[in-house]
Amino acid sequence: MQDKPTPPRHIAIIMDGNGRWAKGRGLPRTVGHKAGAENFRKIATYCKNIGVKYLTVYAFSTENWKRSEVEVSAIMTLLKRYLLEAVDSMERDRIRLHFFGDMTPISPELRALARETDGISGRLAADDFQANVCLNYGGRDELLRAARRFAADCAAGRRYPNELDETLFSSYLDSAGIPDPELIIRPGGEQRLSNFLLWQCAYAELYVTDTLWPDFGERELDQAIAAFQRRDRRFGGVKESET
Ligand code: IPE
Ligand code: IPE
Ligand code: MG
């Protein structure tokens, strides 16, 4: 049997298709979100086991507030349940948990849980597996928040506009200190980023599959990684054989 290809260090997933998955079964959309949350647990564990270092998942976008109150609160309840579980298990499983996004409009209860998981993550080793959950996240919002904070630092005399370069700007983003994802996977078939990781996606390989997120299993992830390994990543250069 062939060895599995070495996985990318950082994989990002747009967890899309929960609603269609439920609808296809004649079930309410919220049931699809529950199945999606269960799949996240499974795929995060699998990523950790195969040696992926960072997994960033899009759980709720700055645009997802447009959905019904019932759907939004079902998603928040699932997140709360996940965080309660994580508080009990992440130290044992050596999983660090981090949030990307503007947490201000998130309920105080969820924010307190996120602070708790942050505290536990801080006690784990820096090279332990890290899951980043994007919650009330939008790539444009992240860039604006970063720009505002940099401007405030300049106004306070802590920074100078001329010293701003890609490295310094990256340190103001939610993803500060985390390498860019090499691979972005979108289940659910849509060929767009929907405001996900707009800065970090610059040279990410994109992989879209029609499989809906609750059905996206370990074999599908293996296939995505294998496809990634076959890509020719040139980063704007030319291959030596073509010079
Ligand atoms: C992704 O699944 C989850 C969130 C956006 C919160 P969707 O709920 O968008 O599922 P579809 O795209 O309607 O099938
Ligand atoms: C993207 O999915 C956001 C998440 C998966 C959290 P959407 O379902 O919101 O994206 P669009 O509306 O199809 O672009
Ligand atoms: Mg969708």
Image: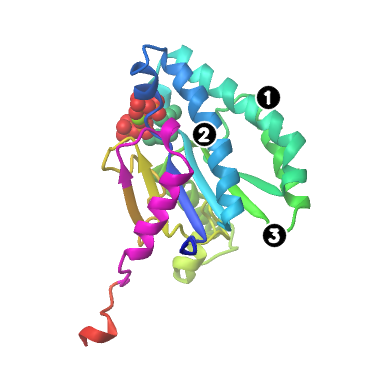
The answer to which of 27 and 161 lies nearer the viewer is: 27
Tell whether label 1 touches label 2 (CB within 8 Å).
no
Image coords of residue 242 (percent x, y): 21, 84
Report which residue position mark 3 lands on. 126
Between discs 2 and 1, the one toward the N terminus:
2
Distance from disc 1 to disc 3, alpha carbons, whole Å, reads 27 Å
Tell me the kind of residue under disc 2.
Answer: Asn
Q: Is mark 1 within 8 Å of ligand 1?
A: no
**Extreme residue in the front direction:** 1
Residue 93, above or below 77? below
Query: For the magenta stretch, what is the residue range?
Result: 208-235
Report which residue position mark 2 lands on. 39
Distance from disc 3 to disc 2, alpha carbons, whole Å, reads 25 Å
The answer to which of 22 and 180 lies nearer the viewer is: 22
Tell whether label 2 touches label 3 (CB within 8 Å).
no
Residue 88, above or below 45? above
Distance from disc 2 to disc 1, alpha carbons, whole Å, reads 24 Å
Q: Which residue: 37% across, 50% down?
A: 198
Image coords of residue 66 (percent x, y): 38, 22
